Amino acid sequence: MHIAVVDYGMGNLRSVAKAVEHVAPDRQVVVTDDPDRVASAERVVFPGQGAMPDCMRELDARGLRPAVIEAARTKPFLGICIGLQMLFERSEEGDTPGLGLLRGRVRRFPAERMVGADGSKLKVPHMGWNEVRQTRSHPLWAGIPQNARFYFVHSYFVEPADPGLIAGETHYPAPFTSAVAGSRLFAVQFHPEKSHHAGLKLLSNFVAWDGRTPAAAQSPQAALTGTP
Amino acid sequence: MGLATRIIPCLDVNAGRVVKGVNFLGLRDAGDPVEIAKRYDEQGADELTFLDITASSDGRDTIVSVVESVAEQVFIPLTVGGGVRSVADIRRLLNAGADKVSINTAAVQNPALVEESARRFGSQCIVVAIDARRVPGSDPLRWEVFTHGGRKSTGLDAVEWGKRMQAAGAGEILLTSMDRDGTKQGFDVELTRAFSEALDIPVIASGGVGGLQHLVDGVKLGRADAVLAASIFHYGEFTVGEAKAYMSAKGIETRLTDG
């Protein structure tokens, strides 16, 4: 059994694969665009870089959509950056429909509100190290201090329709959702593979994760849409 | 608390070794890039930038293996620049483990390269490096873009060029003052501020850092989103941790190593 890193031709997956290999030296890490290799994996990492319309197009061009949806529902699944955004219903970026696994939308940081506490202009993309407040306990947060900093680079953020999905929150300048937890999936806006100790810890937690999200904190509303 | 100001040590790499020019008179060996990268990583560097200054084209493959080795061991963002001329160059560096690639002279010669690479790889990995020099006697102050390591004048207004690169899809600007580079007199904070106010994307200030107060000035007076420095870190004058502690004491939010 291998860990699949889904490759749909967008951006650089080398960093993700290297970081997973680093925390799981005894496991086989496969960067793949083959739906069968995704389907046969024990767990799946779904990264993403670039623009969401291109990501969705390339994902479909490789016939990966069904395998990704199936993996997100059935095995430990980690979405990263655009890989988080693509799980939702729709993005403002190019008005693009996402995979619709999670209810909610993806919005751009509103230009008129990008002002810091001291009146200075806040840049978009949101780029650099920011704090993540863990809004619920989760096996993927194990051993990571509350408000640890992770590396971000993005211009859009997710707005889950169900607040019960939210697992982490970050301020820029308003709070936005920086991590979500579904029944078998966990997805983050930041880049754990570039986030030093805290990021490697999250990846090693993911590699050890049995895919169960503690039920106590699950929202009464179904986290996943379309599941039986 | 919010986004931390980034401190980025810069490593000039010549034929696989980190070097530092001394007042343009020669290159001093500053050590093995992997060892130095690991040291900065341990000290709390937020990112690392490698600038390949290798003159010969056969020496260029060495930067790729340097990046590969560093990326195996250092899990913070890595930017690589110097001699990047084509989409193929960018792809090669990204595949080696770089997270961002910085384009300088080639952006001026062929602005479509920035557009095409941002479209293909995403703006997040395209940094446009701009070497700017003050236009003597200009009022209001103006700066001109120079290429080829600051030797060749272009006639381009630097701030206008920055805006154009932002529109072309650059994710970030690495802004070096050629007036200050190597002088240890501090950043050209007027230049940095002019860019930071004109652009919506992050601006990394570079060129001239000789002490820790210069880093603070770059952020407070120059409004830089990140500060880049080389020599103050290379010879052990200051650690990245000391720089962060100093900036933090001056009220700048940093990612402290103990946090």
Image (cartoon, helix red, strand yellow):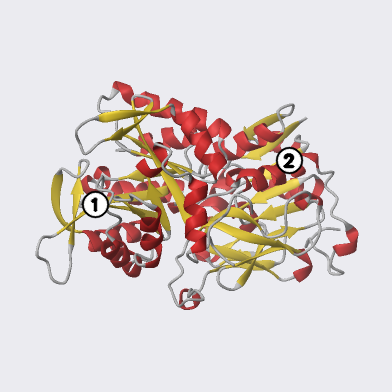
The disc label shown at residue B180, or none = 1
Task: State the residue at coordinates (20%, 41%).
Answer: B148
Q: Chain of mark 1?
A: B
- Dots 2 and 1: beta carbons under 8 Å? no
The disc label shown at residue B223, or none = none
Mark 2 residue type: Ser
- From the image, which quarter does the C terminus of chain A lie in? bottom right
Looking at the picture, how far across and down is residue B55, in whole percent? 25, 28
Q: Residues within 10 Å of mark 2 (few under 14, many from 20)?
A: some
- For this orientation, the residue located farthest to the left is B137
Q: Chain of mark 2?
A: A
- For this orientation, the residue located farthest to the right is A216
Q: Nearer the viewer, residue B37 or A42?
A: B37
- From the image, which quarter does the N terminus of chain A lie in? top right
Is residue A191 something one can see in this rendering? yes
Q: Which residue is mark 2?
A: A204
Looking at the picture, how far across and down is residue B253, in whole percent? 52, 62
Q: Nearer the viewer, residue B93 or B9?
A: B9
Secondary structure of residue under mark 2? helix
Compared across the picture, whether A60 is left or right of B195 comes to right
